[in-house]
Image (cartoon, rainbow, N blue to C red):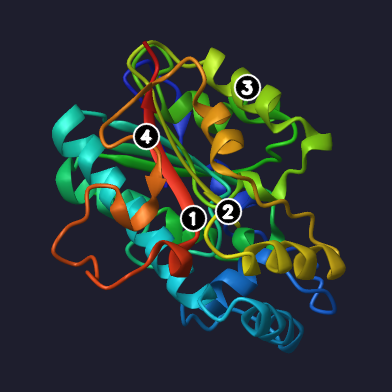
Amino acid sequence: MTSADPHGTQVGTWWKTLADVRNPVDLQTDQPHSARMYDYYLGGKDHFPVDREAAERTLAVFPNARIAAQANRAFMIRTTRYLAAQVGIRQFLDIGTGIPTSPNLHEAAQGIAPDARVVYADNDPIVLTHARALLTSTPEGRTAYLDADLHDPESILDAPELRATLDLTRPVALSLIATIHFFPDSDDPHAILRRLLQALPAGSHLTLTHATADYDEGMERVAATYRAGGIPAQQRGRTDVARFFDGLDLLDPGLQIVHRWRPDDDTPNDLTDAQVSFYGAVGRKP
């Protein structure tokens, strides 16, 4: 289960203490969890009654939550395939991974470029229990899972799992899908993002999506519902979301409601901005 990278570093055994962890993991099944609620919207099975109840309260104030989640995930797949096929990116760092739902990011990337390398990072116990699903990889590529907190970007950037998998002298695609809206302004998410981008070389890309109430005020009620359940949440308007891309060159068509970003044949043509209510964009570090 161990292999050596070109520099002689042994990799592959670290997951025995993570994805194969034998110690009990507290899934906090008495509290709603954003990853499990998202899994419920996507039609998954990895959730508990408390998550379903919270998700149904969300659906009561924003009935399009399932549509929005599906459009958001489709954006992640499209952008990953675009970056691999059209830009030539071969390294991906996905923070705020969530519960694995196929196709995962590495499946999208390696479907285009079998030699792509992907590091997933999350600090949620429920994601940790499913981490092995994120570690499947083509023989040519590599995947790794990192148990770390985005509030502490150094814990991600300095992690040996990341350093053994990605070469930070070469471009990296940083993916923050439906993650930053769980960071209120008091957490200073702009500073967190700046630190991550600072560590990545020119030619790296940021892919980010964020919930907004610009088109349906129900999304603000969604944020309030999450906060009432103990989950920090803050929807943001277009100007505030655009700030996360300061200093980056936006790829066409710029910041869009996610279903409008380079739609493909699988994108429903009857979606409205109000139904989706997620902004998304891809920016390049010059």
Q: Which of the two labelled residues, at mark 1 and mark 2, occupies the earlier sequence position?
A: 2
- Residue at the disc numbered 2: 212
**Is 125 located above or below residue 172 in the figure?**
below
Which numbered disc flags the more N-terminal residue, 2 or 4?
Answer: 2
Residue 190, position as x, y percentages in the image: 66, 27
Mark 4, residue position: 282
Disc sitting over residue 158 in the figure: 3
User: Dot 1: what SS?
Assistant: strand
The answer to whether any part of residue 264 appears in the image is yes
Upstream in sequence: badge 1 or badge 3: 3
Crowd tier of the residue under label 3, counting other residues whose Cα lies within 10 Å: few below 14, some 14–19, many 20 or above: few
**With 213 as the anchor, is 7 left or right in this view?**
left
- Residue at coordinates 25% horizontally, 33% vertically from top-left? 252
Q: Are the two marked residues, 1 and 2, in contact with CB atoms closer than 8 angstroms?
A: yes
Q: Please give the residue where the numbered disc 1 appears in the rendered image.
A: 278
Question: How far apart are the alpha carbons under marks 2 and 3?
Answer: 32 Å
The amino acid pointed to by label 1 is: Phe
Q: Earlier in the sequence, mark 4 or mark 3?
A: 3
Q: Where, by quadrant of the figure, is residue 203 drawn?
A: top left
Q: Which secondary structure, mark 4?
A: strand
Q: Residues within 10 Å of mark 4 (few under 14, many from 20)?
A: many
Foreground tag (4 vs 3): 4
Residue 251 x, y percent position in the rendering: 29, 29
Report the residue at 60% width, 57% height from top. Answer: 213
